Image (tube, rainbow, N blue to C red):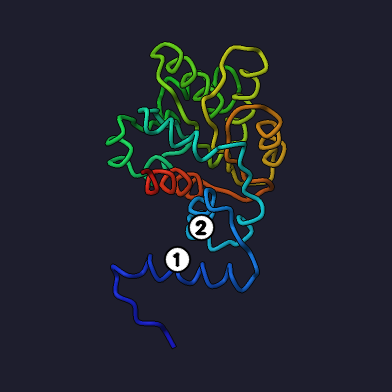
Amino acid sequence: MTEHVKPQDIEARSFEIIAKELADRGIVLDPEKDPVIRRAIHTSADFDYAHTLCFSDDAVRIAKGLIRGGADIVTDTNMALTGINKKRLASCGGSVRCYMADETIAAEAKERDVTRASVSMEHAAREAMASGRKTIFAIGNAPTALITLREMYDRGVFVPDFVIGVPVGFVNVVEAKELILETDIPHIINRGRKGGSNVAAAIVNALLYTME
């Protein structure tokens, strides 16, 4: 039997189900991290996020502080860009950008035989340094984006203000996430192969929806 739920009540009902299943599994979430983890579960229907989503010290507080201060967000996919609540972000003075479809980025990537995600991160870093604006990187697809951020960090060229790292897949995905976890860059990272642009957007939105 299907459950009759009014369209406006579907999300609330989904979170009721998530709460019950978390309780049934004996999972008690840290109050600060709770909204982020629940929204990741909500967008993926995957309760593994309760165990694999990793937060650096004071990650939620730091991320919200950056957003409140007008930080911009750079994503590695147009899907993540579309999913992020831009109106909420704009109310704090920030904007969200993705350079993956930029023809100049694509041409440089082809010439250098590297991924567009890698070139996009370099471009975003240069923009952030030139403007002085704080930037949160929300990576849901390309491990090379995380690898490039780590390489710039190691060279002392650029230190991201915050990294949300949840790329999905099989090639260099696990390793790229660990590269960020090894640093002192404030972060929310999902260990393992799971993730996706939808999860990256969900994490950003969880932060936005719980702003004081």
Which of the two residues, 136 or 34, is positioned nearer the viewer here?
A: 34
Considering the numbered disc 1 on the image, is that residue within a helix, a strand or a loop? helix
Mark 2 to mark 1 CA distance (whole Å) = 8 Å
Kindly identify which residue carries mark 1: 15
The quadrant in which the N terminus is found is bottom left
Determine whether label 2 and label 1 are within 8 Å by CB: yes
Rate crowding at label 1 as few (under 14), some (14 to 19) or many (20 or more) other CA atoms within 10 Å: some
The C terminus - image quarter: top left
Question: In terms of image quadrants, where is residue 84?
Answer: top left
Residue closest to the far bottom: 1
The type of residue carrying mark 2 is Arg
- Give the class, few, some or many, for how many residues have Cα within 10 Å of label 2's Cα (few <14, many ≥20): many
Does 187 sit above or below residue 155?
Answer: below
Residue 192 screen position, x and y as percent: 69, 47
Location of mark 2 (residue): 38
Under circle 2, the secondary element is helix
Percent of width and height locating residue 182: 71, 31
Q: Compare marks 2 and 1 and give the one earlier in the sequence.
A: 1
